[in-house]
Amino acid sequence: MDKIFKDVGDIQSRLLDHRPVVNAEIRYFLREFEEKRGHRESRLLENVNKMVVETNKQMLPESLEGMNQQLSDILTRLEAANHMAARVQQRELEAHQSTKLQANMEHLKDEWTEFLKEQQRLKEKVDEEHAKNVGQLSARYSKIKEDLDKLSDF
C-alpha cells in the first residue's frame, strides 16, 4: 500500500508540479537574452528613449500650440453654431406661438359667434314671453274695463 501511495505521489508531482519545467524555461530565457544577446536590447531601448525625449522637447510644444489654435477655432465655430441654432429655435417657437395664437383667436371668434346666437335666441324668447304677458295683461285689463263700464252703466 505504501508503494502505491508513493507511486501516486510521484505521478501527481510529475503531472501537476510544473516548477521544474518553469525553472528550465526561465533559465533558458535568461541565458538567451543575457548571455547570447549581451546588452544589445538595452542599447536599443536607450536609443529609443533618447528619440522620445528629443521628440517631446521639439515636437510637443509645436503640437500643443497647434492643438490649442485648432481647439479655439473649433470653440468659436461651435459657439456660432450654437447661437444660430438658438435663433432658429426662437423663430420656430415664435411661429408656433403665432400659429397657436391664431388658433386661439379663431376659437374665441367661434365662441363669440355662438354666444351672440345664444343671446339672440334668449332675447327672442324673452320678447315672446313679454308679448304673451302683455297680451294676457291687456286682455285682463280689457275685461276689468268692460266690467267697470258695465257697473258704471247701472
Image (cartoon, helix red, strand yellow):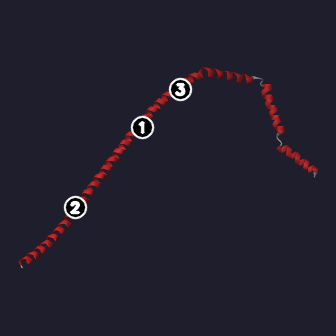
Q: CA distance from mark 2 to mark 3?
A: 80 Å
Nearer the N terminus, badge 2 or badge 1?
Answer: 1
150 sits left or right of 70 in the view: left
Q: Nearer the viewer, mark 2 or mark 3?
A: 2
Q: Residue at x 85, y 46 (%)?
A: 12
In the picture of the structure, the residue carrying the numbered disc 1 is 86
Nearer the N terminus, badge 2 or badge 3?
Answer: 3
Q: Nearer the viewer, mark 2 or mark 1?
A: 2
Question: Residue 121: x percent and y percent?
Answer: 23, 62
Q: Secondary structure at mark 3?
A: helix
Look at the picture and state if 20 lies above or below 109: above
Q: Say which mark, if any, is on residue 68.
A: 3
Q: CA distance from mark 1 to mark 3?
A: 26 Å
Question: Residue 86: x percent and y percent?
Answer: 42, 37
Q: Secondary structure at mark 2?
A: helix
In the picture of the structure, the residue carrying the numbered disc 2 is 123
Q: Residue at x 33, y 47 (%)?
A: 101
Q: Amino acid at mark 1?
A: Ala
21 sits left or right of 51 in the view: right
Q: Amino acid at mark 2?
A: Lys
Question: Residue 75: x percent and y percent?
Answer: 49, 30
